Image (cartoon, grey):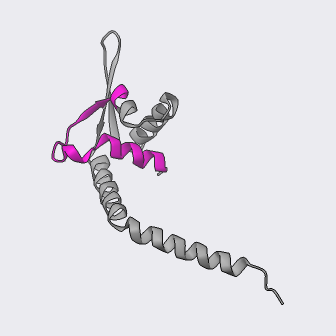
Amino acid sequence: MHTRHAFIVGAADSPAEEGTSQISRRFAELRRRLDGVTPKVLTQTLRALEREGLLTRTLYPTVPPRVEYRLTGLGRELGGLIQTLTDWSQANITAIRAARREFDERAEQETEPVRR
């Protein structure tokens, strides 16, 4: 699964709405939640998620047509895993940043030329 797929599943299943397993989202709402994602990329990703069984797409025969997306059980399960990973990342960001700094400092020292 691509990173953007996980990102969109996370947007479709916001933690503020846990326990509401049948939330439908319209395209415009998803686009607002995912600032910076182009309509083309969002459309491609939603189609891929539907193909993978992570969401369903319902087209209502209205003028203009109304389309809603809903996570499947599989999509909700993935959303929970994404939330767990997000929580872990936020809880450990200080340690992660410290490890990066230490690594970068060691790498910088190792690449300095030996002076005689």
Residue at the bottom extreme of this rendering = 116
Left/right placement of residue 15 relative to residue 110 reads left
Q: Quadrant of residue 89?
A: bottom left
Instruction: Locate residue 61 relative to residue 95 in the image: left or right.
Output: left
Where is residue 113 shown, x and y percent of the image?
78, 80
Residue furthest right in the image: 116
Of residues 57 and 80, which is closer to you in this image? 80
The magenta span reads: 3-29
Q: Residue furthest top?
A: 63
Which residue reaches farthest front? 116
Q: Is residue 60 magenta?
A: no
Q: Position of residue 75 (x, y in %)?
A: 31, 47
At 60% across and 76% down in the image, what residue appears? 105
Residue sitting at x 40%, y 37% = 34
User: Residue at point 40% right, 68% down?
Assistant: 94
- Residue 73 placement, left or right of 64: left
Where is residue 91 shown, x and y percent of the image?
32, 65
Decide: is 51 above or below 67. below
Q: Is residue 99 above or below residue 1?
A: below
The image position of residue 3, as x and y in percent, is 47, 50
Front-lying residue, 79 or 14? 14
Q: Is residue 54 visible?
A: no
Q: Is residue 15 left or right of residue 112?
A: left
Question: What residue lies at 29% left-to-right and 31% top-to-bottom?
Answer: 25
Q: Is residue 89 above or below residue 20?
A: below
